[in-house]
Amino acid sequence: MKTLDWPVAAILNHLLARQPSECAQLAAHAGKRVAIDAAPVRLHLAIGPDGLFFDDGDTPATVTITVAPADLPRVLTERERATAYVHIAGDAELARTLSEVLGALHWEIEDDLAPFVGELAAVRIARAARATVKGARSASRLAAEQLSEYLLEENPMLLYRRAGEAFAAEVTQLRDDVERLSKRIALLERSSGSRP
């Protein structure tokens, strides 16, 4: 079993085990194989009769999901737009089912923490973790907005797209005007040179 196939399958199976309706959808595709290619990492998983994943070596895939390494963070953080960053080839019905199932998977951290810290503490820890993540996202978004405002307005190292397009249009107009003027001058020179 390759290094990442087992942990990825274990994580997916852990989430699927808590959502039997999603397992049932995958069970309809038992025996089919999925390859996830996020170079340099390539995972090979197969779907079992119970709708759970298992390692299946390097056998040919029924569906191949390709993700550019640069897009991997977007796929993981922007789940609602994840399909925009991946290329899917192979069995269309399995690809659609995978998209639906993976989109519906969610982790209930409280259920996993409760056996160790108790239900009340698990709920509080999960709530604090969600608030921390939300705060971090807000802070990073605000920092990005402030940086872009600084680079565009305070210390203009960048241009607004409209301003850049307007500048390019003005440069094109100026170039055309200079060409026309140059042709007129050449025409005047020829006409004045042809006279005695």
Image (spheres, helix red, strand yellow):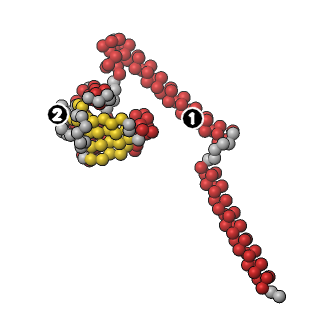
In the rendered image, which residue does mark 2 sit on? 49
Quadrant of the image for the C terminus? bottom right
- Which residue type does callout 2 highlight? Pro
What residue is shown at x 33% (from left), y 36% (from top)?
A: 42
Q: Residue furthest left?
A: 49
Quadrant where the N terminus lies?
top left
Which percent across, then down, holds residue 107? 34, 26
Name the residue rendered at 33%, 24% in the picture: 108
Q: Residue at x 79, y 82 (%)?
A: 193
Residue at 21 percent of width and 40 percent of height: 32
Q: Say few, some or many: other residues with alpha carbon within 10 Å of mark 1 (under 14 / 14 to 19 / 20 or more).
A: few
Q: Is residue 23 visible?
A: no
User: Which sits in the foreground, 63 or 51?
Assistant: 63
Helix, strand or loop for disc 1: helix
Q: Which mark is residue 144?
A: 1
Label 1 to label 2: alpha-carbon separation: 47 Å
